[in-house]
Image (cartoon, rainbow, N blue to C red):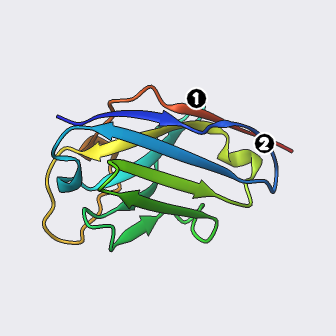
Amino acid sequence: QVQVAESGGGLVQAGGSLRLSCAASGRTFSSYTLAWFRQAPGKEREFVAGITRSGGGTSYSVSVKGRFTISRDNAKNSVSLQMDSLKPEDTAVYYCAVANTIYYSDFISRRSLDYDYRGQGTQVTVSS
């Protein structure tokens, strides 16, 4: 079972950057598709970005494509989210998510229920 701990959130002005990190424990980390989801107050959790087991495939929501970059380092059991050109609407708690099924293709689910959330999340606040 993979456990995760997110870090790197904070308060930043619109147009600024943050880099979120997720440290994972568990020998099978590299077996799973990983993703970042976010949840703003009063809203449902939404997909932000995902990455395949090898790191060779990525997927982004329309709202962040071109501004955010997801990456992973299986040797270090970590996944990161580089967030540039931040907007006030990016304000949310960001969660590192581990797929609850092993996908052997390049498929990256965007459904929240296809992932487990084993961290506390990290708050990102973007001021205008």
Residue at left offset 32%, top offset 30%: 118
* Amino acid type, residue under disc 2 in the picture: Val
Depicted 93 relative to depicted 29: above or below: above
Judging by the rendered image, the residue that carries numbered circle 2 is 12
For the residue labelled by badge 2, is the local secondary structure a helix, a strand or a loop? Answer: strand
* Circle 2 crowding by C-alpha within 10 Å: few under 14, some 14–19, many from 20: some
Asked if one can make out residue 46 in the rendered structure from this viewpoint, the answer is: no
* Circle 1 crowding by C-alpha within 10 Å: few under 14, some 14–19, many from 20: few
Q: Nearer the viewer, residue 51 or 22?
A: 22
Depicted 15 relative to depicted 2: above or below: below
Residue at left offset 74%, top offset 60%: 85
Judging by the rendered image, the residue that carries numbered circle 1 is 42
- Figure quadrant of residue 25: top left
Q: Nearer the viewer, residue 51 or 75?
A: 75
Query: Residue lying furthest right in this view?
Result: 128
Residue 122 placement (x, y as % from top left): 55, 32
Residue 126 placement (x, y as % from top left): 76, 42
* Direction from residue 109 to residue 42 in the image, left or right: right
Q: Nearer the viewer, residue 1 or 106?
A: 1
Viewer-side label of 2, 1: 2
Q: Nearer the viewer, residue 19 or 77?
A: 77
Determine the CA span between mark 2 and mark 1: 21 Å
Residue at left offset 29%, top offset 58%: 109
* Amino acid type, residue under disc 1 in the picture: Gly
Residue 92 placement (x, y as % from top left): 61, 37
